Image: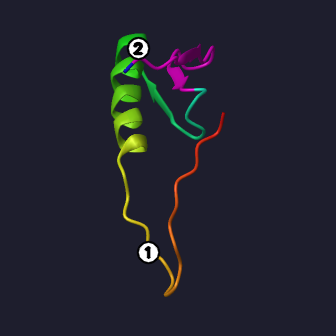
Amino acid sequence: MKWRVILEPDPETGDWAIWCPELPGCTSAGESEEEALENIKEAIQLYLQPESIQLAPGAIAREIILS
């Protein structure tokens, strides 16, 4: 899968912030562009990992499709 990521340099520290616009809250950072790119790969993998959801008794889980 390909994901668009945005790299932003910090002018004070020289570090790089990186985030994925399609995945709200999926961010990372690194001391270099390369490190930031490696870190966001791990962040995206963790973001996309399915979690089990605890449902209340009688609750129903459904999937919907948006067009």
**Residue at image point 50% right, 66% down:** 61
Of labels 1 and 2, the one closer to you: 1
Residue 13 counted in the magenta span: yes
Q: Height in image: 60 above or below 22?
A: below
Q: To which residue does mark 2 refer?
A: 32
Q: To which residue does mark 1 refer?
A: 54
| Residue range (magenta) | 2-20
> Hey, what amino acid is under mark 2?
Ser
Q: Quadrant of the C terminus?
A: top right
> Hey, what amino acid is under mark 1?
Gln
Residue 29: image x %, image y %?
A: 47, 27
Front one among 5 and 37 = 5
* Secondary structure type for disc 1: loop
**Residue at image point 64% right, 39% down:** 66
Residue 49: image x %, image y %?
A: 35, 46
Residue 10: image x %, image y %?
A: 60, 18
Q: In the drawing, does residue 8 fall left or right of residue 15?
A: right
Front one among 15 and 40 = 40
Residue 64: image x %, image y %?
A: 58, 50
Label 2, residues with CA under 10 Å away: few <14, some 14-19, many ≥20: some
* Residue farthest to the bottom, as pictured: 57
Quadrant in the picture for residue 25: top right
Q: Quadrant of the N terminus?
A: top left
Q: Height in image: 67 above or below 63?
A: above
Asked if disc 1 and disc 2 are in contact, CB closer than 8 Å, the reply is: no
